[in-house]
C-alpha cells in the first residue's frame, strides 16, 4: 500500500464513521487519512477536488446502492467499497453491479479486509461469494475456466489478483483501452457481469 492514501466514508451513522476514522489510520500506521463525507444525499458534492483515492459507502440507509451509483458517476476512477448492510447477498450483489469493487463488514471488522483491498485483493463475503459462484444456470467454475485459452486465463489471474487496468496494461504491454476490450470479452465468455464475479469464479476454480 502506498503512502498518503485518502479515504472518504459516506455514511449517516456517526458512530461507525468515528470508529473507522480512528481505527483505519491506526491499522495503517498513519498512511491513510480518513474523513467522514456525509450521508450520501449529495455524493457529487462530497467528492469534489481533491477526489479521495477510496470511498467507503454504507449500504445502510440513508446511503445504499443509490449512493454507490452516484459515487461511481461522480468519481469514475476512484475505487469504491461498500460497507455491508444487513448481510443480504442480493443487496450486496446490487452494490457490486452499481459500481462497488468489494463488500466490507461493518465496524472494526471492516479494517482487516480493507487492508487486503488496499493491497489489491478483491474482498467479498463468503455468503455472497457462494451466490456469485453457484447461481442457478451458471456452469461450474471449473467448466467455466476450462474453456478459456491461455491468454484469457492469464488475464483472469491478473484480474483476480486485484491488478488495475493500468497495471494489467503494463504486464501485457498493451494500452488501457485494449485491456478494457479484452476484459469485456472475457466477462462475456465467463457469463459474469463484473471483475469481482470473475475473480470469484477464478478462486473457486483454483486459478489463484
Image: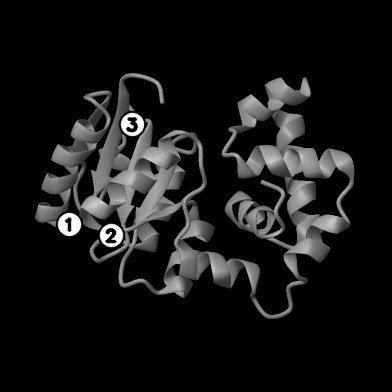
Residue at screen point 68% across, 29% down: 168
**Mark 2, residue position:** 63
The quadrant in which the N terminus is found is top left
Q: Position of residue 51 (x, y in %)?
A: 34, 29
The local crowd at label 1, few if under 14, some if 14 to 19, many if 20 or more residues have their Cα within 10 Å, is many
**Mark 1, residue position:** 12
Question: Label 1 vs label 3: CA separation?
Answer: 18 Å
Question: Label 3 vs label 2: CA separation?
Answer: 18 Å
Residue 157 picture quarter: top right
Q: Nearer the viewer, residue 38 or 196?
A: 196
Q: Position of residue 199 (x, y in %)?
A: 63, 51
> SS class of the residue under badge 3?
loop
In the rendered structure, are the residues bearing label 2 and label 1 in contact, judged by CB atoms less than 8 Å apart? yes
Residue at screen point 21% across, 55% down: 107
| Left or right side of 45 for 143 | right
Q: Which callout, 1 or 3, points at the residue further toward the start of the chain?
A: 1
**Mark 3, residue position:** 52
Q: Which callout, 2 or 1, points at the residue further toward the start of the chain?
A: 1
> SS class of the residue under badge 2?
loop
Q: Is residue 107 above or below residue 3?
A: below
Residue 162 picture quarter: top right
Q: Is residue 135 above or below residue 193?
A: below
Residue at screen point 77% across, 25% down: 172
Amino acid at each position: 500500500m502506498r503512502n498518503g492514501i485518502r479515504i472518504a466514508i459516506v455514511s449517516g451513522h456517526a458512530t461507525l464513521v468515528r470508529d473507522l476514522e480512528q481505527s483505519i489510520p491506526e491499522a495503517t500506521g498513519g498512511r491513510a487519512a480518513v474523513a467522514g463525507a456525509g450521508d450520501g444525499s449529495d455524493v457529487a458534492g462530497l467528492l469534489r477536488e481533491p477526489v479521495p483515492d477510496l470511498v467507503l459507502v454504507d449500504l445502510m440507509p440513508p446511503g445504499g446502492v443509490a449512493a454507490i451509483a452516484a459515487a461511481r458517476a461522480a468519481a469514475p476512477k476512484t475505487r469504491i467499497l461498500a460497507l455491508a448492510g444487513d448481510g443480504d447477498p442480493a443487496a450486496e450483489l446490487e452494490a457490486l453491479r452499481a459500481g462497488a469493487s468489494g463488500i466490507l463488514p461493518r465496524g472494526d471488522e471492516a479494517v482487516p479486509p480493507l487492508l487486503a483491498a488496499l493491497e489489491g485483493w478483491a474482498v467479498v463475503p463468503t455468503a455472497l461469494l457462494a451466490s456469485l459462484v453457484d447461481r442457478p444456470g451458471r456452469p461450474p467454475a471449473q467448466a467455466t475456466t476450462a474453456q478459456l485459452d491461455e491468454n484469457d486465463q492469464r488475464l483472469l489471474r491478473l484480474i483476480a489478483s486485484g491488478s488495475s487496468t493500468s497495471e494489467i496494461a503494463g504486464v501485457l504491454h498493451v494500452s488501457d483501452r485494449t485491456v478494457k476490450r479484452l476484459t469485456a470479452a472475457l466477462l462475456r465468455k465467463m457469463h459474469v457481469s463484473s471483475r469481482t464475479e470473475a475473480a470469484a469464479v477464478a478462486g473457486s476454480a483454483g486459478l489463484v
